[in-house]
Amino acid sequence: MYAHILIATDGSELATKGVQHGLSLAVALKSRVTFVNATEPFPGFGLGDPMANYAATDSFNDYQQEGVRFAEQVLGKCKAAAEEVGLDADTVHVDMVRAAEAIIETAKKRDCDLIVMASHGRRGLGRLFLGSQTIEVLSYSDIPVLVVR
């Protein structure tokens, strides 16, 4: 049914539930698995901010290095979890891209036929103010999405 499952994770406790659910599904269906983690774009300074030229370079480099380090840690745990259940999984870190865009593009590039991700299930103002990468993936993906709560 689903031959290649993309499992999105940000390393949070909630995302771990999505990882576990996605792995269980992959084992049952004998599917391939790819994990994806994204580092969001570096927060920019306001236009005309006098500190932008001085502070941005070091801060950007530190942010980017920490994003890579964090992704390696998160994806390493996911790969180990996959190996524990007998799966050989690929891992992808997408740097400086919004999570929803990274998830959708990775799923397309890797020919995945299902995206598995977790969601807090916020409603109303909480969703409006906090945003929702899950809602964005659901809205723009041509690939089926399984949301774990």
Image (spheres, grey):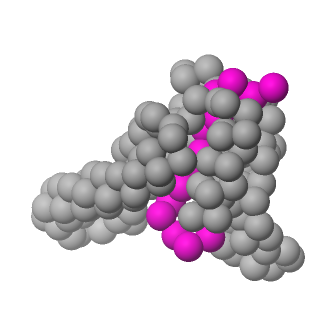
Residue drawn where x is 72% and y is 71% of the image: 120
Left or right: 116 with respect to 92? right
Q: Give the range drawn in magenta.
A: 1-14
Across and down, in percent, residue 70 comes to 32, 60
102 vs 78, nearest the viewer: 78
87 vs 50, nearest the viewer: 87
Q: In which quarter of the image is the N terminus?
A: top right
Residue drawn where x is 62% and y is 57% of the image: 20
Q: In which quarter of the image is residue 141?
A: top right
Asked if residue 12 is among those painted magenta in the image, a careful observer would answer: yes
Across and down, in percent, residue 12 comes to 52, 70
Farthest bottom residue?
125
Work out whether residue 97 can be spotted: no
Residue drawn where x is 47% and y is 51% of the image: 84
Work out whether residue 134 can be spotted: yes
Considering only vertical position in the picture, is 74 above or below 26? below
Considering only vertical position in the picture, is 130 above or below 100? below
Across and down, in percent, residue 77 comes to 40, 57
Across and down, in percent, residue 149 comes to 77, 67
Considering only vertical position in the picture, is 24 above or below 101? below
Left or right: 63 with respect to 132? left
Residue drawn where x is 59% and y is 55% of the image: 19
Left or right: 22 with respect to 1? left
